[in-house]
Image (spheres, rainbow, N blue to C red):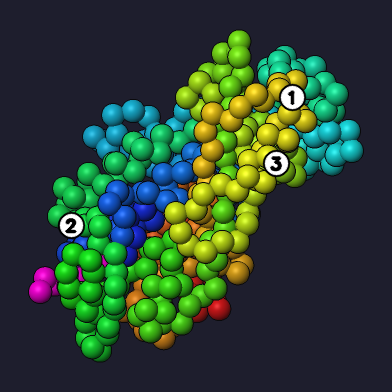
Amino acid sequence: MQTYDIAIIGGGIAGLSLAYFLAGRRSVVVLEQEDALGYHATGRSAAEFVLRYNSEEVCKLAAISRPFFDTPPDSFSAVPLLRQRGGITIANAEKAGRLRARFEAEAPHAPLTLMTPDEAIARVPFLDPAYVAAAFYDPEFWDIEVESLFQGFVKNARRAGTEIRTGAGVRDIRDDGRRWRIETAGGTLAVRMLVNASGGWADGVAAMAGVRPKGILPHRRTAVLVDVPGMDLGAMPEINELDEEFYFKPDAGRLLVSPADETPCEPADVQPEEIDIAWAVHHFEEATTVKVDRVAKSWAGMRSFAPDRLPVIGSAPDNPRFFWLAGQGGYGILSSPALGALAASMLCESTVPESFSHASLDPALFSPGRF
């Protein structure tokens, strides 16, 4: 039976970013139940990087992660990890006053530009003038090159000696008081420390290991691709409705449209519901002059949240050899450099990255002991 210092259950962005930042300091095996890495949440992300509009803690995680995205290590990626997109926030007549209030609150701290409806439509000609009553522009929206980021974590983790197993779903976990014995579809192994980076399955993995779950619940989010004939969408900014009822942005020559739904679901290979596809189309048609004749593609992904919607990172109070790295919500890719480095420092009992103190972000906020 093979033995390791650390087993990471989950081959998505959380588990692989941690494996990367462990950088050969421990012997590590990553266990992914699917035949491909990043199959669930990681592979179905809208790939957006922003510094605002999320919770204060998530915004700080973005700020901590940004230097890695801007200047990744040599040979990490053949292409830049961020591509500037820019974003326009829009509101209808009913919400126009609140949009201007948000602009006035944010503008002293951010490079925002208030737009007239005509100026917004000049940037995105198919916005409907009957809908758009107020808008502002934020240049600090970026597209994340998710595949390049993810493969950078994977290839460098492997280079550092990490073993990565796919098709290795965990069937049983037992603690003998010194090591974990993990039975997988590919055999049994023994490890000193178990990391739960299994996304929507995190509470189930904890229960299997005899550790108290944290109430981490997966939520389904839907996206569709639609065509906008006669339009060059490449340089178009992302469009966000003021209250996040919907958003749309270019994606490979089409528009990705989401109703920004968050529907509680069971952890699974989630599929879009017809009603959510219909809402995506409805919102898009309401805000634009485009009539959607067909949906070119639709899909859904999981976003998993703890009860307070903050990540859960650290050793379990009821078993210090069980380490939580879960509950990243829809921000796992955006925050992966920050949280991967933080988790690695905790597991190696080294100093927390200075970037957390510079950002005035206390990692204790993410402790599993808060529940």
In the rendered image, residue 307, in percent from the top left (x then y), is placed at 60, 69
Q: State which region is magenta.
A: 1-7
Disc 1: which residue? 288
Q: Magenta-highlighted stretch: main secondary structure?
A: strand
The residue mark sitting in front, 1 or 3, is 3
Is residue 5 magenta-colored? Answer: yes
Please tell me how crowded label 1 is: few (under 14), some (14-19), or many (20+) other residues with Cα within 10 Å. Answer: some
The numbered mark at residue 279 is: 3
The numbered disc on residue 163 is: 2
- Horizontally, residue 1 falls left or right of residue 186, namely left
In terms of image quadrants, where is residue 150? Answer: top left
Tell me which label, 1 or 2, sits earlier in the chain.
2
Residue type pointed to by label 3: Trp
| Kind of element beneath mark 2 | strand
User: Residue 97's spot in the image, x, y percent?
Assistant: 88, 38
Query: 136 and 206: which one is in front?
Result: 206
Of marks 1 and 2, the one in the foreground: 1
Q: Within the magenta stretch, is there residue 244?
A: no
In space, the residues marked 1 and 3 are separated at their CA atoms by 14 Å
170 relative position to 312: left or right: left
Question: Measuring 84% from the left and 33% from the top, which residue is drawn there?
Answer: 92
Please say if 313 is above or below 252. Answer: below
- Choose between 310 and 362: the one closer to the eye: 310
- Between 288 and 196, the one nearer to me in the picture: 288
225 up-or-down from 161: above or below: above
